[in-house]
Image: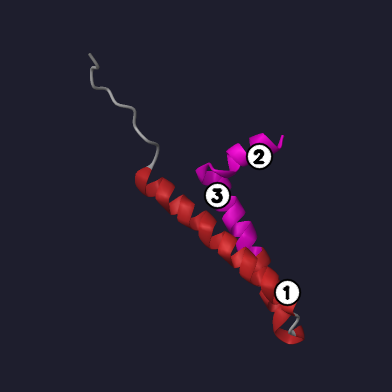
């Protein structure tokens, strides 16, 4: 089951959903950390922000490069 989730995570839709989810969690923990100044909340906000950037970076690369094309050249 986890293998299927990982495979789906690297699809365009999966990257978008995981990116939005991590962005929401980063916003939540940053909002909680501002009034309380707990270090662990700031740390989680940073971790989820980095995850958001990674997922959206991978998503943009998928849109730019797409699937690798197989060669149609004849091989001798």
Q: Judge the density around disc 2: few (<14), some (14-19), many (≥20) Cα neighbours within 10 Å.
A: few
Q: The magenta stretch spans which residues?
A: 1-24
Instruction: From the viewer's perspective, tell me whether residue 45 is left or right of residue 13.
Output: right
Residue under circle 1?
41
Residue under circle 3?
15
Q: Is residue 32 visible?
A: no
Q: Judge the density around disc 1: few (<14), some (14-19), many (≥20) Cα neighbours within 10 Å.
A: some
Residue at the image position 41 percent from the left and 50 percent from the top? 61
Residue under circle 2?
5
In the structure shown, which secondary structural element does the residue marked by tag 2 occupy? helix
Residue at the image position 43 percent from the left and 46 percent from the top? 62
Image coordinates for residue 52, horizontal then vertical, percent: 56, 61
Residue at the image position 40 percent from the left and 47 percent from the top? 63
Image coordinates for residue 58, horizontal then vertical, percent: 47, 51
State the CA–CA distance, disc 2 to disc 3: 11 Å
Instruction: Indicate the quadrant containing the N terminus: top left, top right, bottom left or bottom right.
Output: top right
Furthest residue in direction top, as rendered: 76
State the CA–CA distance, disc 1 to disc 3: 24 Å
């Amino acid at each position: 089951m986890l293998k299927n989730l990982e495979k789906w995570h690297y699809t365009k839709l999966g990257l978008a959903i995981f990116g939005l989810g991590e962005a929401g969690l980063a916003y939540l923990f940053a909002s909680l950390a501002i009034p309380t100044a707990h270090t662990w909340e700031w740390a989680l906000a940073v971790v989820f922000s980095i995850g958001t950037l990674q997922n959206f970076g991978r998503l943009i690369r998928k849109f730019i490069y797409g699937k690798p094309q197989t060669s149609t050249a004849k091989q001798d």
